[in-house]
Image (cartoon, rainbow, N blue to C red):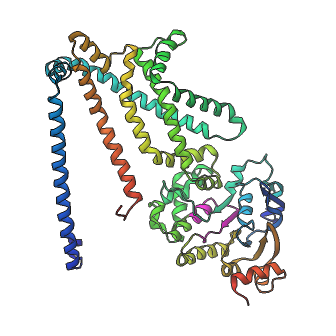
Amino acid sequence: MPAASRRPPVSAVELDRRAYRRQQNTRSVLVSLISTIVFAVVVWLTVINTPGWSRVQQSFFDIETAIEAWPRVIAGLWVNVQVLFFAVIGVLVLSVLIATVRTLRGPVWFPLRALAAAYTDLFRGIPLIIVLFLVGFGLPGLELFPRNSAQFWGTIALILTYSAYVSEVFRAGIEAVHPSQRLAARSLGLNHGQTMRIVVLPQAVRKVTPALMNDFVAMQKDVGLISVLGVVDAVRAAQIETAANFNFTPYVLAGLLFVLLALPMIRLTDWYTARLRAREQIGTLV
Amino acid sequence: MTAGPVLRLDGVRKRFGDTEVLGGVDLTVGEHDVVALIGASGSGKSTLLRCITLLERIDDGQIWLRETDISDPRVPADRIRARIGTVFQQFNLFPHIRVIDNVTLASRKVLKVPRAAAEARALELLDRVGLADKAREYPDRLSGGQQQRVAIVRAIATNPELLLLDEITSALDPELVAEVLDLVRDLSTEGTTIVMATHEMAFARDVADRVVFLDGGVIVEEGPAAEVFQRPREERTRAFLSRFLGPS
């Protein structure tokens, strides 16, 4: 490390401060470690000493049932992942579109603007499960569209509901970009569309990325709700296994798998948020 | 093209609600003219510039850019704005794209110049202002003075017929003002037509061909820089200048 060797020698006062901080650090790590272990042991002992623990363990945490249910549940989870993949793409496209429409000014755009506003009001209000029923059973019933699987309609329902939330996140981002950016772009001769696409939206997306990622995490578990349409996803598979064995372990297994699916995204969100914060408060202690 | 004026304002009025910000402004800016707008904060300098570049709609009067009445709503505003370069007090560079992309954006997207040609021209301009090595940086890595020089380069990259400068040194630390003003001085000697709102009286006296003193949204006094600064005719001009330059 040539850079370090050129540094001037550190004063005795600073060395003393560093030693003190190191000591404080070691102490807090020890305290947190011990308190975590104590807490975990207390919780564990409390649970296994409850009067009904053995029965609960048998019907919710049975290893053999879990192993038996595994192939079906994991196959179901793959369906969830596929639905999630297409739903995320659909949500991103639709919500950017709606957010953009809501920021259009001028009376010509009133019908579109009103439609977009009505859409976000409606779909933020209706419970997802009702949208699933309406879209999954109602829309095919019109016999207007070619025959599609329940998985397809479930994906559409998810897109419709989540786009309403996500478009509001995008709109907040668009409004958070300082108006002077728009002025600068327009003064260069860029038209409204170019200004949005090249100047405003890229900055808006950056501002709302943590919030977007959080909505994405929420969506990750809500894909399980498409099971109400009869799609054999992880939840539905667990239900089938549960009915076969009168044991709830497959549900717990499915739940764990959903957590594992969500974890990378949750960690990524935390990391990204922390990075943004670190960048904004360089050089402060608190 | 004939030697007609680049810009002509004819009785321009602008109100915000009940406040009249511009009360009938007449102004003519000829080819290669450098006009300095001076006046206290709120005198209407910035509003006037924003009306010229069509960021504000005027309430009466006419604005002519060469032979075009640009206050006519039938005139495509985007095309007019592309003919006028504007530099703002707060630089307003686009923080998410690199310096070179800031500079080439209008050429590429509005004038449809191929990227290679636009970048060659941008690099040439950046080199002239001593910032060629910053072309690939993001704007927030630059000092205020450097950012403002980039903003000026961005404004002139499309060879606008008119350059509007809106108090471009007001947000800068004092030691960074000179580098920006030197660039404006260079542009003026090269013949760029400039209208600038400024608080830099010494600079205005030095560089401007003509000084326009605005007060309460009207032009109180207008004339050659030396004349307005040394022998102001109007009492209001004298009062304003003595506050800035100290009593003579």
Look at 72% across and 67% down and name the residue there.
B42
Q: With B106 as the anchor, is B206 left or right in this view?
A: right
Q: Quadrant of the C terminus of chain B?
A: bottom right
- The x and y percentages for residue B191 are 69, 72
Q: Of B151 and B115, which appears nearest the observer? A: B151
- The x and y percentages for residue B161 are 70, 62
Q: With A31 as the anchor, is A186 left or right in this view?
A: right
- The x and y percentages for residue A110 are 69, 34
Look at 50% across and 31% down and name the residue there.
A163
- The x and y percentages for residue A48 are 15, 29
Which picture quadrant has residue B228? bottom right
Q: Of A170 and B69, which appears nearest the observer? A: A170
Q: Of B242 and A199, which appears nearest the observer? A: B242
Q: Which residues are magenta?
A: B151-170
Residue extending farthest to the front is A51
Q: With A252 as the anchor, is B22 left or right in this view?
A: right
**Is residue B66 visible in this depiction of the protein?**
no
Q: Quadrant of the N terminus of chain B?
A: bottom right
Residue A149 within the segment the image draws in magenta: no
Q: Is residue B168 above or below residue A30?
A: below
